[in-house]
Amino acid sequence: MGIKRLDVVRTWKELRSLRRSATGTLDEVQTIQMPRLRWMVDHAVRHVGLYRSLFPGDAARRLQHPDDLLRLPFTDRAVCRANPIAELLSSDPPPGSRRISSSGTTGEPSEVLYSPGAAWYQGILALRRDGVRGLRPWDKRCEVTSLREGPRRSGIWELLDRRFMRVPTTRPPALLARDVLALRPVLLAGHGHLLVELGEELDGAFRPRYLVTYGESLDGVTSDALVDLYGQRQLDQYGTAEHGSVAWQCTAADLYHIDHEAVLLEVLDDHGAPVPPGETGEVVLSGLWNPLMPFLRYRIGDIATLADRPCACGYRLPALARIWGRTMDWILDSRGRWVAPQRLWIDHHLERDLVQGVVRRYHVRQDATGAIRVLVLPYRDLPADFANRLQASYRRLLGQDAMIEVVPVADLPLHPSGKFRRFSSELVRSRDAWQSESPATPW
Ligand SMILES: [Zn+2]
């Protein structure tokens, strides 16, 4: 079985400490955060090439208060990508490390490595989050996910993983529905668009106790469709491959509780100063839990509003009222059916060697006539069969008569949030329902 007593005790202790700190004061949370931050910055400056060249040598010693972070330079995906992976790692990955590949909502395929201890800690954070929501560790869960992970986990997680089904986003809705009906999970999680497709397929045959969304900001149409199909408002979750779990809604479906013990979250104005509660700014994250591949002062490219009141559940620590960005449109196929944008993710349609190291960013645009243009910003010239292969695969999804054009571009401007809208459809936006129900964009 491979489950050690020590493993169980350690997990239980850490979980108990996380439960306690979530009900503590900000001062108490900072007494957990600051030593972890100092340790991680010191470790990164000593052992990770990127931070050795970017941060001052005594950066850790200068960190007495979270505001001292403001003096350290930012990193972001572009900075990380400009470096070979060895410059981002503190050592060779030890045995048991986990490799997380994300096709992600950012349109930039990436890989992140978690040390064994870091992967374990993410598991504890998930247990804490689920516990706050009233789930028990043995409750069955089903997640429709685009994250690809390394080998199955061992130890205590091996037991829990058996109650946990991961289904790839590439699976057609009819098969997803069959999986869900066979498992009858207590919690069903996934991208909002895919859960709508699945809900339509289920047609009321099954409603989980918990519905969880992540990976994008949902427009009003999609949120309302979820309520309609599942009879409940979804609980949203915010995290990234680089930073793991960051913030999530409890069952009050109100504010986003932040995993303060695992990540130092800053919300900054245009001048890089922290915004006051109630204000909106750019999210900057410093991970405190993954020494193998630290991401510090990382501009994730999302915009968030800092809460100015406690959560409806009574949670009083700093929380997020709203997370903006990563909005994606539905796409219409040639017969006028709505297709979830995740179904058009390039790495679901092409082999890995046609995507990794080839596509830097891409954008799918549907114009008012329904024609689709795939704008690709490549690292180098696109392989000869790239366009044909992508067109053929998209046509299998959208209809053989779908108009699809692949256009290599020299520049692909970023969205004001730092994340350009990867999937946009003039055709969908021109519909009345969309315009009246879609939330106003904050920029
Ligand atoms: Zn709450």
Image (tube, rainbow, N blue to C red):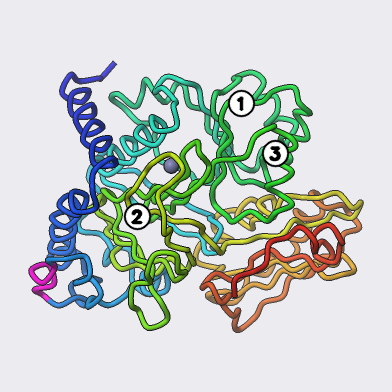
Figure quadrant of residue 264: bottom left
Between discs 2 and 1, the one toward the N terminus: 1
Between discs 3 and 1, the one toward the N terminus: 1
Quarter for ligand 1? top left
**Residue that numbered label 3 is attached to:** 227
Could you tell me if residue 54 is visible in this image?
A: no
* Most frequent secondary structure within the magenta stretch: loop
Rendered view: 330 above or below 205:
below
240 to the left or right of 20: right
Element under disc 3: helix
Residue type at mark 1?
A: Pro
Coordinates of residue 92 in the picture (x, y in percent): 22, 53
Element under disc 2: loop
- Tags 3 and 1 in contact by the CB under 8 Å rule? no
Coordinates of residue 359 in the picture (x, y in percent): 56, 68
- Report the front residue among 258 and 123: 258
Q: What span is in magenta?
A: 57-63
Residue type at mark 3?
A: Val
Element under disc 1: loop
Mark 1 crowdedness (10 Å alpha carbons): few <14, some 14-19, many ≥20:
some
Between discs 2 and 3, the one toward the N terminus: 3
Q: Which disc number belongs to residue 318?
A: 2
